[in-house]
Image (tube, rainbow, N blue to C red):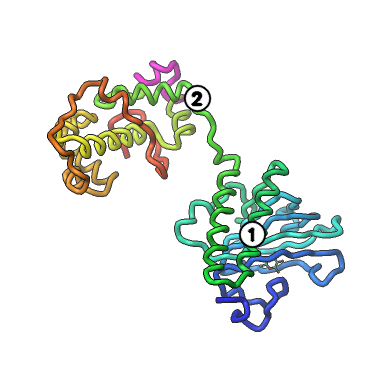
């Protein structure tokens, strides 16, 4: 729906605009004593999200103990249930900010949970000029694309917004990839080399010279999942690979990836992969000839063993082989 259909008030910078639309983008130039110099006060939030970025001057969000200020390069994300209460900071002659109002696509959920929040309002500060220019450019493109009123311009603006949200996610300090501690790397390698064995956390800890509890803590912090879950993921990755690329009997694959009980292996497989091992094998392309991989540790060292993307951390457990 275009802004002209949206309601009586057709200027989204002024109170009364309906926002009954998927995406609206704009720039609000607030100058002291100018027509836009009022506090934006939406106690019940809005039905969509708003992301904004200060490009000039200073804004003030909330009042009293919750009050904070935003300066050029600061981004804010207001989810629908966040209260809006913001305007020019009294000590600043102006506050210019770019903003995009939007109804998100379902799969964006992950990028919309900002870590740093005050009263549900997400905050992100861009640390340097190059990033500020890049992000301002994105806001500009979203706004100009949305205004184009060409065929599919709304979709294109949504597409650019998706890019902006992903960039915000990437630039969130907590989401930056940090190098993995060498002891954790070694622990992963040790676990990978011994996938078919029931090594316990004490053994891994001894191997990397950490106490079991320190290892469990550090592992989870660095890998995002606990040791048990991580190893289970590796086992499933390897099992899938072997099911897909060999005709090795399922029981043998199960024991090769650490499950002597084929039934238990199938249960875990179904839980993680969503189908049974035999269904998975059937639905994958069968290899042209029988090629059973000789199951030696050397054969496994070449496998690319990585955690599955999007895994949610589960609680730490000290006894391996007992995953929740
Ligand atoms: C404008 C505000 C802007 C944003 C949009 C939806 O009036 O200036 O910050 O809230 O409304």
Mark 2–mark 1 distance (CA, rounded to whole Å) = 40 Å
Residue 173 in percent (x, y) is at 60, 40
Left or right of 34 in this view: 125: left
Q: Nearer the viewer, residue 130 or 206?
A: 130
Which residue is disc 1 drawn over? 141
Residue 151 showing in the rendered view: yes
Residue 128 in percent (x, y) is at 71, 41
Q: Is ligand 1 less than 8 Å from the beta carbon at label 1?
A: no
Residue under the point 58% across and 76% down: 2
Residue 13 in percent (x, y) is at 72, 71
Q: Residue 181 has which mark? A: 2
Which portion, as a residue range, is magenta?
202-214
Residue under the point 42% across and 40% down: 313
Considering the image in quadrants, where does the N terminus appear?
bottom right
Residue under the point 68% across and 79% down: 10
Left or right of 254 in this view: 169: right
* Disc 1 packing (10 Å; few <14; some 14–19; many ≥20): some
Judged from the image, the secondary structure of the residue bearing numbered disc 1 is helix
Considering the image in quadrants, where does the C terminus appear?
top left
Q: Nearer the viewer, residue 290 or 65?
A: 290
């Amino acid at each position: 729906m275009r802004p002209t259909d949206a309601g009586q008030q057709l200027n989204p910078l002024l109170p009364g605009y309906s926002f009954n639309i998927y995406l609206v983008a704009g720039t609000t130039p607030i100058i002291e004593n100018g027509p836009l110099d009022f506090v934006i006060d939406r106690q019940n939030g809005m039905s969509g999200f708003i992301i904004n970025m200060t490009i000039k001057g200073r804004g003030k969000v909330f009042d009293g103990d919750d009050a904070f200020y935003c300066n050029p390069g600061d981004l804010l994300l207001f989810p629908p249930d966040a209260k809006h209460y913001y305007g020019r900071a009294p000590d600043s002659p102006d506050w210019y900010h770019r903003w995009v109002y939007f109804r998100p696509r379902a799969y964006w959920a992950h990028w919309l949970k900002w870590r740093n929040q005050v009263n549900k309002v997400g905050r992100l500060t861009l640390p340097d000029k190059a990033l500020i220019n890049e992000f301002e450019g994105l806001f500009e493109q979203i706004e100009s694309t949305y205004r184009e009123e060409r065929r599919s311009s709304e979709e294109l603006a949504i597409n650019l917004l998706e890019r902006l949200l992903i960039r915000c996610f990437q630039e969130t300090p907590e989401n930056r990839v940090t190098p993995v501690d060498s002891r954790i790397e070694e622990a992963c390698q040790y676990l990978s080399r011994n996938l078919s064995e029931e090594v316990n956390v004490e053994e891994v800890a001894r191997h990397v010279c950490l106490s079991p509890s320190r290892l469990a803590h550090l592992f989870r912090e660095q890998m995002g999942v606990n040791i048990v879950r991580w190893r289970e993921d590796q086992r499933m990755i390897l099992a899938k690979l072997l099911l897909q690329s060999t005709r090795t009997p399922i029981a043998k694959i199960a024991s090769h990836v650490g499950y002597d009980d084929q039934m238990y292996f199938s249960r875990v497989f179904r839980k993680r992969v969503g189908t049974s091992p035999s269904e998975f094998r059937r639905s994958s392309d069968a290899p042209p000839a029988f090629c059973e991989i000789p199951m030696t540790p050397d054969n496994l060292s070449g496998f690319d063993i990585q955690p599955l993307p999007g895994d949610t951390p589960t609680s730490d457990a000290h006894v391996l082989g007992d995953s929740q």
